[in-house]
Amino acid sequence: MVGKIDLAERKWATKVRAAREKWLAAIKDASSLEEYCQKIAEFIGVDPATVRASFPARNYAEFQRNAEHYVDVWMSAVERAASRGKWKKGYIDAFTKH
């Protein structure tokens, strides 16, 4: 018998597959890097220029340029995790291990 958590895990993997093109468009959008820098700057309380010049921001720019490669990596990781029950196990552990 398939439980609710199993169905939720399958739904998660299905949603990821369906979101491929939307995810690619969002990452490749020119404003994506700027939004990333602004949000990080606001969160840690520094000037956005500081974030823009940082190593993580430069990595984000590379990530953005190669989004087609990374979307497949992301989707494969989610599908592997779902097929192995990793999300389910982590979710159950979060609520049952003290």
Image (spheres, grey):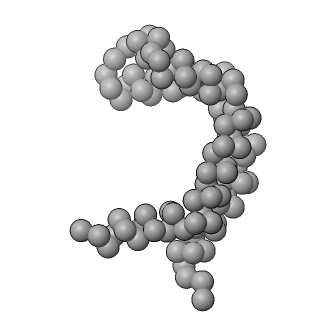
Locate residue 30, reporting x and y percent.
66, 21
The residue at the point 43 percent across, 64 percent down is 90
Q: Is residue 75 above or below residue 5?
A: above
Q: How many marks?
A: 0
Residue 57 vs 27, above or below: the answer is above
Residue positioned most to the left: 98
For the view shown, which residue lies furthest in the bottom direction? 1
Can you see residue 40? yes
Q: Nearer the viewer, residue 30 or 10?
A: 10
Q: Quadrant of residue 31?
A: top right
x and y percentages locating residue 55 in the rendered image: 47, 18
| Left or right of residue 72: residue 57 | left
At which x and y percent is residue 70?
67, 37
Q: Image quadrant for the N terminus?
A: bottom right
Q: In the image, what residue occupies the spot 33% across and 26% down?
A: 44
Instruction: Kindly tell me whether residue 12 is visible in this rendering.
Output: no
Look at 61% across and 51% down and name the residue there: 77
Q: Residue at x 67, y 49 (%)?
A: 75
Q: Nearer the viewer, residue 47 or 65?
A: 65
Tell whether 9 sits left or right of 40.
right
Image quadrant in which you'd find residue 62: top right
Image quarter (top left, top right, bottom left or bottom right) of the C terminus: bottom left
Residue 88 on image: x %, y %? 49, 68
* In the displayed structure image, the side of residue 98 where residue 61 appears, left or right: right
Answer above or below: position of 67 versus 93.
above
